Image (cartoon, rainbow, N blue to C red):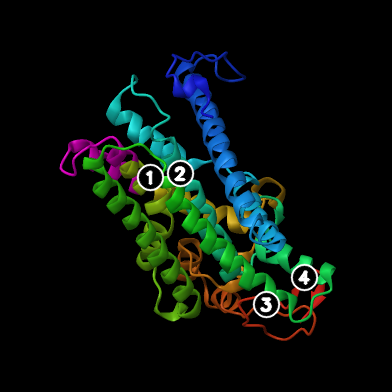
Amino acid sequence: MANDAVAGNATRVAPAGPGDGDDPVRAVLAAYTHDLVTAVDETLTTFLNAEVNSLNEIDASMGSFAAAARDAVLAGGKRIRSTFAYWGWRGAVGGSAALPPVLPALAALELLHTFALVHDDVMDASTTRRGRPTAHVALAEQHIAAGHRGDPGRFGEAVAVLIGDLLMVWADQLLAHATVPSSRLFEVRRCYDQMRVETVAGQYLDVLGANDPANWSVDRALRVARYKTASYTVQRPLLFGACLAGVPADDPLVSAYTRYGLAVGEAFQLRDDLLGVYGDPAATGKPAGDDLRTGKPTTLLMLARELATPTQLSALERPPTDRSTGSPDWSPRPARWPGWSR
């Protein structure tokens, strides 16, 4: 059930928090964001619990598989994409329109996001996400604990891919729960599909760059940031919200959302690149150094290569080391996963 303070569009005046005394606008926006995130999480929980129960009727093992997908969604996150979509919609419809009809569409973006995270973690061989083991690592550990035969790492990765696929299907299903006039459905779906295509395109370029760094550049790294992150994190969610509101493609608001979304989305990725190298895992919820270990040509690393001395460049291009053997390891996966040996 949607949170009443958001769904009912009541004027929200939040008590001033530390540092907010001179910024009442920030306090009101923070209160709205909190209420929106609560409404999105409630929508996701209701939908996902029903889906897990439905799959559990097929087979008990399906229930645990679906529960793993559900838990990946509900494990945390800032709900940034649904928030930008909300403000894209609210900026077009004004303050009087009720939220519940479009809330499933906003929440669907979080399923799409988790699909991308689960697959991205497999591709990057990341071991933690949001302070917890990534899906493929947790599933591999379950494989070991259950005493199953075969390679636990391979099992974990295969099932994580299926979890991502399921999340993509669930996103489509939840989107269909939104109540949107039939005249808008085609444009809403077109915007949503474009967001998905651009996300996959950006992810492919990200993978390609890690395997072809000699042909990469700062401009190409920024292109990856635009399509992998800016598009589906800020720009497309804003435009998706505008589509839900029925804003025509030639409206000046669309141009404003496009320019703003691209700038903020690129900044988001550049900040994430910095956190990926220098961030505190206890604060970010993910390990530091993965991009350096895999040699991923982020904008940060490409700039470092451009500015490096010959000695520094040699160190940057040195292959990662397999700690168990001391030999170079070009594998996209760590030589050892927690809990078993390769």
Magenta span dominant secondary structure: helix
Q: Is mark 1 on a helix, strand or loop?
A: helix
* Residues marked 1 and 4 touching at CB (< 8 Å): no
Q: What residue type is labelled 1?
A: Pro
Between marks 1 and 4 in the image, the one whose residue lies nearer the viewer:
4
In this picture, residue 92 sits left or right of residue 120: left
Tag in front: 3 or 2: 3
Q: What residue type is labelled 2?
A: Arg
Q: What residue type is labelled 3?
A: Arg
Camera-side residue of 47 and 57: 57
**Mark 1 burial class by Cα count in 10 Å: few <14, some 14-19, many 20+:** many
Q: SS class of the residue under badge 2? A: helix
Q: In this view, does 280 lie to the left or right of 313?
A: right
Q: Which of 10 and 45 is in front in this view?
A: 45
In space, the residues marked 3 and 2 are separated at their CA atoms by: 31 Å
Label 4 – label 3 distance at C-alpha: 10 Å
Q: Residue furthest front?
A: 57
On whether residue 245 falls in the magenta region, the answer is yes
Q: Mark 2 or mark 4, which is nearer to you?
A: 4
Closer to the chain start, of discs 1 and 4, is 4
Binning the other alpha carbons within 10 Å of mark 2 as few (below 14), some (14 to 19) or many (20 upward) gives many
Q: Earlier in the sequence, mark 4 or mark 3?
A: 4
Residue that badge 1 annotates = 237
Q: Tell me what residue is drawn at x 29 percent, y 27 percent.
A: 93
Can residue 177 be seen from the camera position used here? yes
- Quadrant in the rendering for residue 82: top left
Q: Give the range drawn in magenta.
A: 241-264
Q: Name the residue under label 4.
A: 143
Mark sitting on residue 81: 2
Q: Report whether residue 26 is seen.
A: no
x then y, percent, for residue 172? 43, 53
Residue name at image x 34 percent, y 20 percent: 95
